[in-house]
Image (spheres, rainbow, N blue to C red):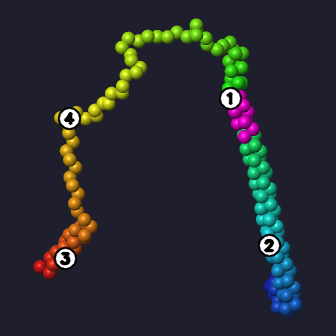
Amino acid sequence: MSQTWFQHTFSRKRFRTRNQATAMAILGVAVLLLLGGLYLSQVASFAITNREIEDLISRRDQLKRQNEQLVGEIASFRTVPRLYARAVEIGFRPATNSDIDYLLIEGYNPQRELALLETTAPSQQLEAAPVYAESFSGWLERQFTLLRDQFESFGE
């Protein structure tokens, strides 16, 4: 009995050409739906990534604007009138002639002429550099002669 059931289930009569075409159409639709779903998931992923990139770019631009604003504030704090006012606030005052002490140093002459120092002693004169008199044509001729000598030595 089991053998007849098996043959009856998979017999050629029951699976006709029309049923095969229907099965292929259903399989094709399923594959198209699967590919469409994959495509839509990729597009959604790209859209999410692009939105995140736009958010990051806007955040970067905002940080750059804040940075420039802070640089401007720092520059305003470094102006001479503001520094002068801050120095007065913490107790500094302009120096007067009675506040300045002058020091005299014996032997110091601010009007002296600059003395030139000799870098090498006369006894340690450098030897003259050798004169380089080789030309390209002389070098090329020497190389050609060496190559010709090598070819002539092959025959010996």
For the C terminus, which image quadrant?
A: bottom left
Horizontal side of 83 relative to 152 (left or right) equals right
Whether pointer 3 and pointer 4 mark residues with C-beta atoms closer than 8 Å, the reply is no
Residue at 46%, 10% in the rendered image: 103
Q: Which residue is mark 4?
A: 122
Sequence-wise, the earlier of marks 2 and 3 is 2
Q: Secondary structure at mark 4?
A: helix
Sequence-wise, the earlier of marks 3 and 4 is 4
Q: Which residue is mark 1?
A: 78
Dominant secondary structure (helix, strand or loop) of the stretch shown in magenta: helix
Q: Residues within 10 Å of mark 1 (few under 14, many from 20)?
A: few
Q: Which residues are magenta?
A: 68-79
Q: Say which amino acid is labelled 4.
A: Pro
Q: Secondary structure at mark 3?
A: helix
Of badges 2 and 1, nearer the viewer stands 1
Horizontal side of 144 relative to 101 (left or right) equals left
Residue at 68%, 12% in the rendered image: 91
Measuring from the top left, give residue 142's x and y in whole percent. Answer: 20, 69
Q: Secondary structure at mark 2?
A: helix
Q: Quadrant of residue 27?
A: bottom right
Measuring from the top left, give residue 83's x and y in whole percent. Answer: 68, 23
Query: What whole-number distance in Å separates the C-alpha atoms at marks 2 and 1?
Result: 64 Å
Q: Which residue is mark 3?
A: 148
Query: What whole-number distance in Å separates the C-alpha atoms at marks 2 and 4?
Result: 91 Å
Tell me the tag on residue 3. none
Task: Note whether 61 is above or below 118 in the view shown.
Answer: below
Q: Say which amino acid is labelled 1.
A: Arg
Measuring from the top left, give residue 25's x and y in whole percent. Answer: 85, 83
Horizontal side of 14 relative to 108 (left or right) equals right
